[in-house]
Amino acid sequence: MNVIVSNKYQSLLTTLDIDIIKNINGEFEVEDLVNQFRNFYYNKMVLDITALKNYQDIETLQNLSVNMDVSNIIILLDDSEVVNSPKYLSSLISMGIYNFTRNIDAIQFLIHNPNTYKDVAQYHQLNSAGTNAEDTSTSESSSSSGSYEKLSLRVIGIKNVTNHAGSTTLTYLLKKQLEKKYECLAVEVDEHDFIYFNDKTLKTTSSLDLPAFIATNSETEVILVDLNDRGSISACTDVIYLIEPGLIKLNKLIRKDKRAFEKLRDKKIVLNRSILNSKDIKDFEYESKSKVFFNVPSLDDKLDNQRVLEELLIKLGFTRFEEESGENAKSNKLFGIFKS
């Protein structure tokens, strides 16, 4: 039997299909919880982090880890920037708190399959304790900039606008193309579809853990994020929005949200698995009052080189492909007699 301690996410936690012996709601000091559950037997405690007073102060969680058996606690994090920062998550791991998530569906899994250190080690910043104030301010000033040169990392989100517009396959194909010229990783969020590509370099994470995944892999040049239909764009430096321009898909989109294209104004709209020609695209733009960034036809995912994706990457600013295109244009002259 399990215990639920809730506050902000009370209604969400009531949807859990688990056996509950006790359910309390409100804001509590750590000492309050210790006193209530010191001699109370339970299997797991599901703890809404907002139920802890002053929970954004990491010392509150330290107090919890010292006074309670945190191996029996599953913490549902909120969406605040502090709680989801790599530093905060790393501190939880240092205290032995391994079972935390922002995904309500993951709680049920963690009850029967609790994390070990191995499951969360990638988010543990072993050198964080040695970071001084000067280092921190330098890091903050560089991360606040939108400049790719200063960050030396581009995080490109691929998000479906029409249902199942092909973000997973396109992410995979873009990775195959990008890694010819760049250090590149691809990660999917809250799904497990990458397994069907039989490529062990493809990664999977949750919405909660995406910022930590990016921080852990900040030395690479490009991270492609398959956001599917629901993933948050907040961790991405750039996002392309996929629309499959079939009549049924478009009608479903408009019936679901009449302002869908208004919301996409000034966004990078990419038509995917498209059979539209240039005239069709102009008609599409006129009717939808939008601008198409790029048009991707149906592609053979077994091919290693996709010229059309190279063109898309050039348009996204990946200039190493542009340099190669210029060299190829020179070398492909009929006889190579005339110099440029």
Image (cartoon, helix red, strand yellow):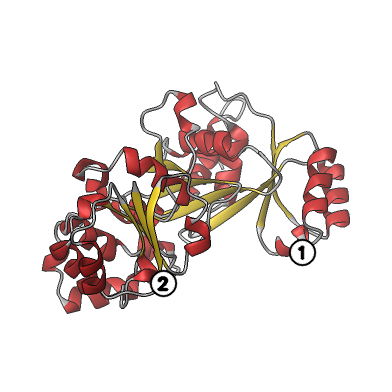
Q: Depth-wise, is mark 1 or mark 2 nearer the camera?
A: 1
Q: Quadrant of residue 53?
A: bottom left
Q: Is 207 located above or below residue 184 in the figure? A: below
Of the residues shown, which amino acid type is indicated by label 1? Glu
Quadrant that contains the C terminus: top right
| Mark earlier in primary sequence (1, 2) | 2
From the image, tell me which residue sits under label 2.
145
Q: Position of residue 205 (x, y in %)?
A: 40, 44
Residue 54 seen anywhere in this rendered image of the structure: yes
Q: Is residue 204 left or right of residue 263?
A: left
Q: Which mark is residue 262?
A: 1
Q: CA distance from mark 1 to mark 2?
A: 28 Å
Q: Position of residue 97 (x, y in %)?
A: 22, 55
Q: Residue at x 26, y 68 (%)?
A: 33
Q: Residue at x 83, y 39 (%)?
A: 248
Q: Is residue 301 left or right of residue 248?
A: left
Q: Is residue 30 left or right of residue 196?
A: left
Classify mark 2: helix, strand or loop. Answer: loop
Q: Position of residue 78 (x, y in %)?
A: 42, 65
Say few, some or many: other residues with alpha carbon within 10 Å of mark 2 (under 14 / 14 to 19 / 20 or more): few
